[in-house]
Image (cartoon, helix red, strand yellow):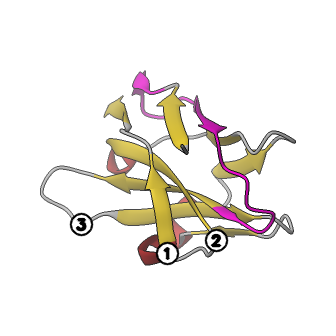
Amino acid sequence: QVQLLESGGGSVQAGGSLKLSCIVTGYRYIYYCLGWFRQAPGKEREGVATIDSDGNTNYTASVKGRFTISQDNAKNFYLEMNNLIPEDAAMYYCAAGEYCPASEMNYWGEGTLVTISS
């Protein structure tokens, strides 16, 4: 059974940093895509960053240069967020699947909340 568990959310001031973690268990595919998504109140879910089994990364434009996605050998993955702005406040979800589009992500965590104070 595949499980994803996020941690690392919290409340920070604008300009601050947080590092989110996603611990993945039971995922045995050789080829995969791991991603971070977020959803703010009243807004649609948005893809933030993805990393695939070849190490290719992709970021939504609004976080480029501020966020970094990484993974370890155990398929756990992370999102380092720097220079946070109020617009980054959201529930952040990690997800995993064979392909990167959100529609192809088969497994999702329950989310970790990020709040930003200005």
- Circles 2 and 1: CB atoms closer than 8 Å: yes
Could you tell me residue 63's position as x and y percent?
Answer: 55, 59
Alpha carbon separation for disc pair 2 and 1: 7 Å
Which label's residue is closer to the chain start, 3 or 2? 3
Q: Which residue is mark 1?
A: 104
Q: Residue at x 45, y 27 (%)?
A: 9
Figure check: 43 above or below 40:
below
Residue in front for this viewpoint, 86 or 58: 58
Q: Amino acid at mark 3?
A: Glu
Q: Is residue 89 visible?
A: no
Quadrant occupied by the C terminus = top left
Please tell me whether mark 1 sits on a helix, a strand or a loop: helix
Q: Quadrant of residue 76?
A: top right
Q: Amino acid at mark 2?
A: Glu
In the rendered view, does 78 fall on the left or right side of 112?
A: right
In the rendered view, does 55 fall on the left or right side of 24?
A: right
> Magenta part of the protein: which range?
9-33
Q: Which residue is mark 3?
A: 44
Q: Which residue is mark 2?
A: 98
Disc 2 crowd, CA 10 A, few/some/many (<14, 14-19, 20+): some
Q: Residue at x 41, y 44 (%)?
A: 92
